[in-house]
Amino acid sequence: MRYLVLSDIHANLAAFQAVLEDAPPFDKIWCIGDLVGYGPDPSECVALLREYDHDCVAGNHDWATLGRIDTDDFNPDARRALEWTREHLDAAGRAYLEQLPSALHFNDFTIVHGSPRQPIWEYILYAGVAANNFAHLQTPYCLVGHTHTPVIFQEVTHNNGTASVATLSPEYDEPLPLPAVRLIINPGSVGQPRNHDPRASYVIFDADERTILYRRVEYPVEITQQRMYQLGLPMRLAARLSNGW
Ligand code: ZN
């Protein structure tokens, strides 16, 4: 069984379609939240995900679209995009977001948008934050999104019984065998990458081979940007897609 692991699609249909075309054959999608917000095609992205066998958790932008989080907690551009999304997401998309859980557990994996400790809001940007979160993790592996940065945090247990966390930058196109130590895995973002690489980022988890594979794929950024300009979404949010930031 192969899983296509996606996070932070952010209503970027062109990026989502490019990932689906680029991915090797897969059986199921695991989606780590923030389907909407920032981008121009929220209803279309929800509908496209629903064409596939999948599981999905909610992200902070999904909850903000539903009014479960105050948009004052977001920066001005994100807030404007969220207000636009609230107006334009269709009823089917909204109903879909309403029923998303904040965490899922499958055998070896926990899936949360932010962190095991705070599934919707906490950013795991650094090893120290990851270290605190391993204490809240009940499974060997955890899939997170939210930071839009592809990274793996690996728990390292020392001979004296203490533990620390190593931060690993993913190798692309090179299957990584899952080790017998705990990992927090971030596949990066499909629709708004932030590690200075504009290509959409995703992961394939092969449950039979016990490997994860990081991939990047180019997509027509200008299509998403033109849609954003036409729809009156913030210019800065469109411009940043060119730089992967
Ligand atoms: Zn996000």
Image: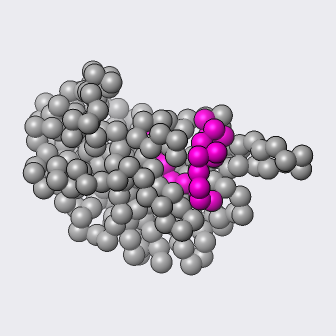
* Spot occupied by residue 33 in the image (x, y as percentages of width and height): 36, 49
Taking the spot 72% from the left edge, 63% from the top edge, the residue there is 180
* Spot occupied by residue 39 in the image (x, y as percentages of width and height): 24, 41
Q: Locate residue 219 relative to residue 193 in the image: left or right.
A: left
Q: Which residues are magenta?
A: 129-146
The magenta stretch spans residue 144? yes
Closer to the camera in the image, 50 or 21: 50
* Spot occupied by residue 107 in the image (x, y as percentages of width and height): 54, 68
Taking the spot 45% from the left edge, 50% from the top edge, the residue there is 112
Closer to the camera in the image, 60 or 214: 60
Q: Quadrant of residue 178?
A: bottom right
From the viewer's perspective, is residue 35 above or below residue 242? below
Taking the spot 40% from the left edge, 41% from the top edge, the residue there is 120
From the viewer's perspective, is residue 38 above or below residue 75? below
* The C terminus: image quadrant: top left
Taking the spot 38% from the left edge, 49% from the top edge, the residue there is 102
Query: Can residue 148 be spotted in the picture?
Result: no
* Spot occupied by residue 81 in the image (x, y as percentages of width and height): 22, 32
From the viewer's perspective, is residue 202 above or below residue 42? below
Query: Can residue 62 be spotted in the picture?
Result: yes
Q: Quadrant of residue 225?
A: top left
Asked which colour scheme the image uses, the reply is one colour
Q: Locate residue 202 relative to residue 211 in the image: left or right.
A: left
Q: Residue furthest right?
A: 160
From the viewer's perspective, is residue 168 above or below residue 211? above
Q: Locate residue 180 relative to residue 12 in the image: left or right.
A: right
The magenta stretch spans residue 136? yes
Q: How many marks?
A: 0
